[in-house]
Image (cartoon, helix red, strand yellow):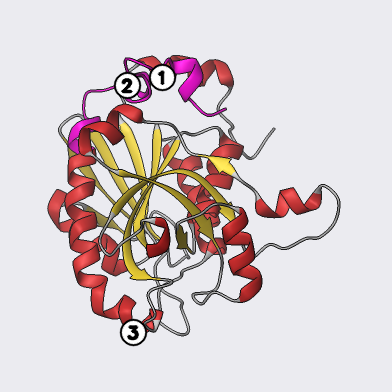
């Protein structure tokens, strides 16, 4: 008997036609999550992941069950569990437990101003990849990059006037020259520390996933990124909160197919495999 329940393509086809009912938000930091928890009055369930620091917040809004999953804080150091490992683990555990219709990875990101990513811009990511998994061996180089398409939602993007972004993920806050080369090769204008890990798990378990990112610091702006990140975090998370509210309102009552089909697109051409 398999320990993992992977949704089949037949299940996915049926799920596309019925209204979305369960959403899992994967949010890396408490500062990003807190405004959203307050807005939707979500209740904490600290026993959902027994023995682990991960925390589920949950509640209902209109016809949607909302679940915000935060990886919590390191049990020794007391800092946010950020990075690809916590993101992948909580995503997998959450999907297995909650069997959501949709995963939304919402958070802040560094942006390349030279590529049109300015402070507090809001992006709906079209594709994600890694920039820190450098494996210069035949075939394994592409595995390392791990490029994946997000669930295509042209209707949502157009309605809320969200910018299109390409996200590159790594486990370090700073960007070294080899990272820069991979980010350029990925054609990315955004960088974060969890998106591609969430996409990897969502792809394995066949759950549609979208990535909502607000620029909190300019990677190429000439200022120290850490300092700029702290200065702009409150404004960026406020923008994220408002945008998440708009996204949830728009999704309510709609099916996945209604999000992915517009006048010029068909479900078959827009939905990622």
Are discs 3 and 1 less than 8 Å apart at CB?
Answer: no
140 is within the stretch colored magenta: no
Report the Cα–Cα distance between label 3 and label 1.
43 Å
Which range of residues does the magenta coloring cover? Answer: 248-273
Q: Nearer the viewer, residue 127 or 87?
A: 127
Q: Secondary structure at mark 2?
A: loop
Are discs 1 and 2 less than 8 Å apart at CB?
Answer: yes
Q: Which residue is mark 1?
A: 16
271 is within the stretch colored magenta: yes
Using residue 265 as the reference point, say whether residue 132 is left or right of it: right
Q: Nearer the viewer, residue 267 or 95?
A: 267
Using residue 36 as the reference point, say whether residue 89 is left or right of it: right
Between disc 1 and disc 2, whose residue precedes?
1
Between disc 3 and disc 1, whose residue precedes?
1
Q: Which residue is mark 3?
A: 227
How crowded is the residue under tag 2: few (<14 C-alpha within 10 Å), some, or many (20+)? Answer: some
| Residue at 27% in and 56% down | 121
Q: Which residue is mark 2?
A: 255
- Vertically, is 207 above or below 136? above
How crowded is the residue under tag 1: few (<14 C-alpha within 10 Å), some, or many (20+)? Answer: some
Q: Secondary structure at mark 3?
A: helix
Q: Is residue 111 visible?
A: no
Residue 166 x %, y %: 47, 49
């Amino acid at each position: 008997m398999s320990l993992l329940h992977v949704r089949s393509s037949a299940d996915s086809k049926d799920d596309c036609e019925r209204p979305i009912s369960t959403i899992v938000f994967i949010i890396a930091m408490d500062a990003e999550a807190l405004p959203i928890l307050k807005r939707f009055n979500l209740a904490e369930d600290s026993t959902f992941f027994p023995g682990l620091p991960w925390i589920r917040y949950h509640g209902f809004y209109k016809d949607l069950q909302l679940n915000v999953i935060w990886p919590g804080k390191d049990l020794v150091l007391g800092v946010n569990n950020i990075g690809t490992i916590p993101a992948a683990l909580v995503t997998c555990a959450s999907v297995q437990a909650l069997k959501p219709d949709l995963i939304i990875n919402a958070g802040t990101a560094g942006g390349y101003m030279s590529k049109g990513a300015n402070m507090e811009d809001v992006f709906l990511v079209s594709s994600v990849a890694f920039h820190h998994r450098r494996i210069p061996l035949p075939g394994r180089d592409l595995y390392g990059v791990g490029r994946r398409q997000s669930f295509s939602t042209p209707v949502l993007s157009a309605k809320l006037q969200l910018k299109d972004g390409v996200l590159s993920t790594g486990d370090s806050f700073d960007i070294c020259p080899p990272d820069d080369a991979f980010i350029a090769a990925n054609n990315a204008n955004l960088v974060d520390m969890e998106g591609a890990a969430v996409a990897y798990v969502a792809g394995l378990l066949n759950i549609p996933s979208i990535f909502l990112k607000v620029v909190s610091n300019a990677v190429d702006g000439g200022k120290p990124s850490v300092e700029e990140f702290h200065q702009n975090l409150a404004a960026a998370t406020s923008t994220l909160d408002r945008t998440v509210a708009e996204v949830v309102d728009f999704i309510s009552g709609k099916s996945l197919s209604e999000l992915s089909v517009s006048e010029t697109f068909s479900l078959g051409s827009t939905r990622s495999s």
